[in-house]
């Protein structure tokens, strides 16, 4: 089981805040997971193909090559705009 | 190190007092306040700051620790507000204290540049023409890459 | 522009309030406070700041104007104390406000670097080993030459 | 008549805060005046030959080549240490 969180524009575009799912097979890295989620439909493809999409694994900023494991909390969000 | 994420306003004078009291080795204190800006072209009535609660303090703490590793700092305070804020209201306060002013200035600007590009906050502006998410600025990413 | 030379303490919160009230175009406020530093090696009990009264405000105003010519600033405040100050007491306050943080940071540091090398103040430290004039630091002159 | 002011260490070393004097003949610049004052005695020579000595004419920082005129207020002081 992994937990997926979506924030700000990403959450609105996908119409979802949070979901849990079994780690899909052959999903070793964030890049793999992204590729997998982009298959869901056209809107998901648009969001997950955006090179500016940011990601965090277990509350730490992460990159495409970051490994993911069962039990992880993985977040997807647009570039941050605080401060 | 004092890291806070809160809805209520902050008292900058009290925060500086807390840092400098009984610490006569501090020679320089640099502070930054970021405010909800309202420019005439598209009046901003208010702003809502959302964040990723489980990650926010961790991200701010990590940024402050990076600053402490790079510069000789006596104290670092980062307070970031979330929730709905009106035009002109303060959003963020960063305070750095050091024996020397160059370290305090550099660390304060570093923390702001990192916070702007690495801390999980998002602003939605409420204008007379409707609501919209604020776009990230390339200039913030460039500012961050200097360090 | 608000330039003051005074013996009494300043209220930083009130000074920032005075700058930002009813100015929602201000997005960034950077402040610097310099304090009487007391390091363990040679304990400083107090410090007396003397100045050249006829020139001081003129010099500070000139430095603030140079900053305003270089950066897009909404407000500049410089308050410098003179007379006898105890260890830990604030000596100087510089506040710069701008639409953008880079301008506010750069202008505040510029003003401090110029003030340190171009404004007619001199510090005499009162230590347990006697009184002595503080020596000017080459690092301050170098800092100033960056600009 | 010109007014001369001395501050901080300079004032203590010369044991004087302020004086007025007639602009000496052939004194067109601060360098000329400095040279002239350095003649007074050994202590004055030490102070006025110090390359770090700072000067102001009419409350504005000035250099050796700055012109001086009757009525000017001229100040001599060590490197400043405010802030």
Image: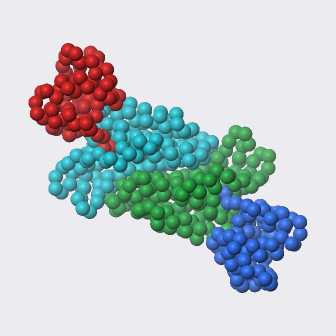
Chain colours: A blue, B green, C cyan, D red
The image position of residue B96, as x and y in percent, is 46, 58
The image position of residue A55, as x and y in percent, is 70, 69
In the image: residue B50, left or right of residue C40: right
At a point 24% along the width and 55% down the height, the residue shown is C45
At a point 50% along the width and 45% down the height, the residue shown is C106
At a point 13% along the width and 27% down the height, the residue shown is D39
The image position of residue B72, as x and y in percent, is 41, 62
In the image: residue A13, left or right of residue C83: right
Looking at this view, name the residue that lies furthest to the right: A41
Query: Looking at the image, how many numbered discs can be counted on the residues?
Result: 0
In this view, A76 is above or below C55: below
In this view, C85 is above or below A5: above
Which image quarter: residue A9? Answer: bottom right
At a point 34% along the width and 34% down the height, the residue shown is C56
Which image quarter: residue B73? Answer: bottom left
In this view, B141 is above or below C144: below
In the image: residue A38, left or right of residue C79: right
In this view, B68 is above or below C83: below
Quarter of the picture containing the C terminus of chain D is top left
């Amino acid at each position: 089981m992994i937990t997926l969180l979506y924030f700000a524009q990403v959450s609105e575009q996908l119409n979802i805040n949070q979901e849990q799912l079994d780690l899909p097979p052959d999903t070793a890295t964030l890049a793999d997971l992204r590729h997998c989620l982009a298959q869901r439909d056209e809107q998901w493809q648009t969001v997950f193909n955006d090179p500016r999409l940011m990601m965090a694994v277990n509350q730490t900023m992460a990159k495409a090559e970051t490994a993911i494991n069962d039990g992880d909390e993985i977040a997807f969000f647009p570039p941050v705009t605080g401060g | 190190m004092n890291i806070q994420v809160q809805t209520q306003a902050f008292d900058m004078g009290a925060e500086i007092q807390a840092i400098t009291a009984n610490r006569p080795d501090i020679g320089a204190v640099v502070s930054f306040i970021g405010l909800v800006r309202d420019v005439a072209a598209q009046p901003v009535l208010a702003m809502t700051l959302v964040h990723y609660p489980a990650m926010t303090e961790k991200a701010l703490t990590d940024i402050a620790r990076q600053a402490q590793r790079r510069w000789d700092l006596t104290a670092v305070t980062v307070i970031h507000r979330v929730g709905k804020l009106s035009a002109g209201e303060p959003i963020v306060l960063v305070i750095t204290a050091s024996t020397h002013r160059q370290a305090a200035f550099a660390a304060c600007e570093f923390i702001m540049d990192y916070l702007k590009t690495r801390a999980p906050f998002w602003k939605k502006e409420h204008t007379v023409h409707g609501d919209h998410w604020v776009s990230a600025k390339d200039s913030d990413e460039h500012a961050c890459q200097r360090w």
